Image (cartoon, helix red, strand yellow):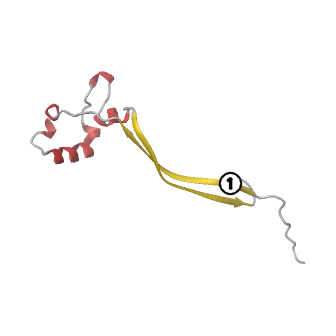
Amino acid sequence: MSEQTENPKTIAVFAREYYETSITKEPVELNLEDYPELEGMSKEEAIDYVESNASEMKPTNDEFGYDSLEEQLNDMDIRRDKITNETQEINAVAKMF
């Protein structure tokens, strides 16, 4: 006995978007003299050190109760946001999920 497949009466069609978002926060100025761990480093060495160790460094401003420079930086206002790599595709499926 052969099975007959029914022609569908409807299909679900939807759009899907992909994108990458980056957010730049307001900077803070580090006075290198306030950070003994940076003593004797060139500017480039200090930059590398801060990028790798911000979570272990003291904040520039203790009055807000930040535990680290990283926490302070993450709490700063957004200066600029940017969306890149935007793509869109149209998909169709037999049944909506």
- Percent of width and height locating residue 15: 65, 54
Question: Extreme bottom residue here?
Answer: 1
Q: Residue, x 28% and y 34% (percent of image)?
A: 69
Q: Given the current orientation, which residue lies at the most extreme left position? A: 40
Residue 45: x and y in percent read 17, 47
Q: Is residue 51 above or below residue 34?
A: below
Which residue has dot 1 on it?
Answer: 14
- Left or right: 12 in relation to 37: right
Residue 57 percent location from the top left of the image? 24, 36
Q: Residue at x 28, y 33 (%)?
A: 28
Image quadrant where residue 81 sits? top left
Q: Nearer the viewer, residue 81 or 1?
A: 81
Residue furthest top as drawn: 63
Residue 66 or residue 8, whichever sits in front = 8
Q: Quadrant of residue 62?
A: top left
Q: Secondary structure at mark 1?
A: strand
Residue 95 picture quarter? bottom right
Classify residue 84 as left or right of residue 16. Answer: left
Out of 36 and 15, give the one closest to the viewer. Answer: 15
The amino acid sitting under disc 1 is: Phe
